[in-house]
Image (cartoon, rainbow, N blue to C red):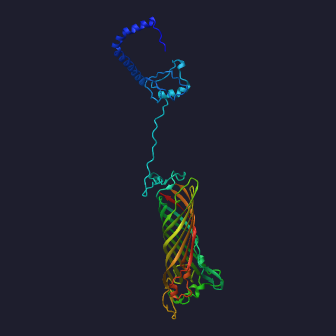
Amino acid sequence: MERMPKTPHHLAALTFVESHEIKAKSWSPFVMKTFLTVPCALAGLLSATALFAQTPVNQYQPATYRPGATYFAEPPAPAKLWGQPTTNVSYSKNQDSALEPIPGDKSYLDALEGKGQAPEAKPAELPPPAMPSLDGTPIDSSFSSSCCEGNYSGPGTAVYGDCCVPCSQWFAYGGGLIMNRDLEKEVWLSNDSLDYSRQLMGTHDAGMDWTGGYEVRLGKYFAASGWAVEGRFWALRDTTDFSITNAGLAGQLDTPLDVNFQGLSYDNGVSLQNATAYFNNAMIHRLRRSSDFYNVELNFFQNPNLYACTSGASNFSVGVLGGLRYFRFAEGMSFSSDTVDTVFDGNPNEINYNIDVANNLIGPQVGFLGSLNHGAWNVSLGTKLGLYGNAITHHSQVYGSAGNAIVDNVASPNNGREFDLNGSRSRISFLGELDLSTSYRLFQNFTITGGYRAVAVSGVALSADQIPQNFEDFAIIEHTQAASDLILHGAYFGAEFVW
């Protein structure tokens, strides 16, 4: 490239530079240090100022906020929000209207000044950890002590309170019974001597009628397993009288047993006569019968719905039962005759034929319990069946106020013996029970109950079965007859209290 010619100006400038070249070399170190130090100091000062005073950009403020507006607030300073200016801000009526905040800033300004600031949220309380069981799984909190204090645990209806599934607790029941029994094959005891087809009195005439009794139960329910243990006792006692006189008869008041009584004699203190002389041609015949029932049980049973409740849905469950039972059935019969008058006052002319039997059953039993719950209502169906040893006792006697009747027959091996006999035997008997009940829970700890119960027993001794064909045959009489059946049935009602 061609070089341009030097002009006078170029020569002057060149001369000036050359004249000052030596001076510049002597000042160059100082000038270089100055040019390097001053910019560095200024840069550091600007960086520090920006660090402490620069206003950060608010990435979350509304689009209507004007960054140029400044507001001066009186102390105390509000809490500083993340991403907001650190300068205290406020506004007043004297400020320029152009700088007044728009309505959209009201919530923002209130937050800056501490107005309407929400209280500090407290961390939610966590429930305590569940206690582990022996197998390592957590124990259901529904059986906690807090629920046990109210007897129930879990959600439920107003009837049951706040809980539903009970904790372990005691329960007691008290109630009444009204029951009847079936009767044996009837044995006729009185007839009209001139009309043998007219039977006047039989064993059914004084048979057990509907009679009342009572029942009590006490037990404990173990909620964790759904099992309960219960002791139960109930009893019934009945005594019935029936009498017939000779008034209005075509003939005399006699007994069809006159042939049976042959061989027995009774001494009224005046003379020894055949027993038929005191039962035939009578002024009055009376029959008195008694029936006593006693039942004691100790049962272990499973019933998950025993104290469960629902919020309206129906729950059905089936449980099992096992236990021991003692059942006593005692029956007495007394056939009396008076040939003097119609009043039984202990006169020696009065004669009585008494039979007493007692069946004592004891043994194990098993059963099933079906339970249907619907709110406060409960319907239960239970069955029990047991095989029992039956210890039977029997006593027969013919007597009057003057003493016992005796065998007066020289041809009899029992001649001269008094008719006051005792017998006993043992056998296996079966007992079954059917129980249908309905209950309503009035309060959390109080329930009323009503139901029907039937008890059937086989292999029992009845008093009427002990009447012999021949009163001289003591061996037959002492061998107690025990081949009959018994059915006892009726209603019950009561109330249960839980604590």
Residue 224, percent across and down? 47, 58
Residue placed farthest to the front in the image? 2
Q: Nearer the viewer, residue 158 or 240?
A: 158
Q: Nearer the viewer, residue 228 or 6?
A: 6
Q: Is residue 18 above or below residue 498?
A: above
Residue 391, percent across and down? 48, 78
How many numbered dots are placed on residues in this image?
0
Q: Nearer the viewer, residue 487 or 224?
A: 224
Q: Nearer the viewer, residue 183 or 290?
A: 183
Residue 304, percent across and down? 52, 60
Residue placed farthest to the top in the image? 8
Q: Is residue 2 above or below residue 100?
A: above
Left/right placement of residue 184 relative to residue 132 reads right
**Residue at 52% from the left image edge and 86% from the top image edge:** 476
* Residue 354 makes an appearance in the image: yes
**Residue at 55% from the left image edge and 24% from the top image edge:** 102
Quarter-of-image position of residue 375 = bottom right
Q: Is residue 337 above or below residue 384?
A: below
Residue placed farthest to the left in the image? 26
Q: Is residue 126 above or below residue 6?
A: below
Residue 160, percent across and down? 53, 53
Residue placed farthest to the bottom in the image? 411
* Residue 280 makes an appearance in the image: no
Left/right placement of residue 75 relative to residue 210 reads left
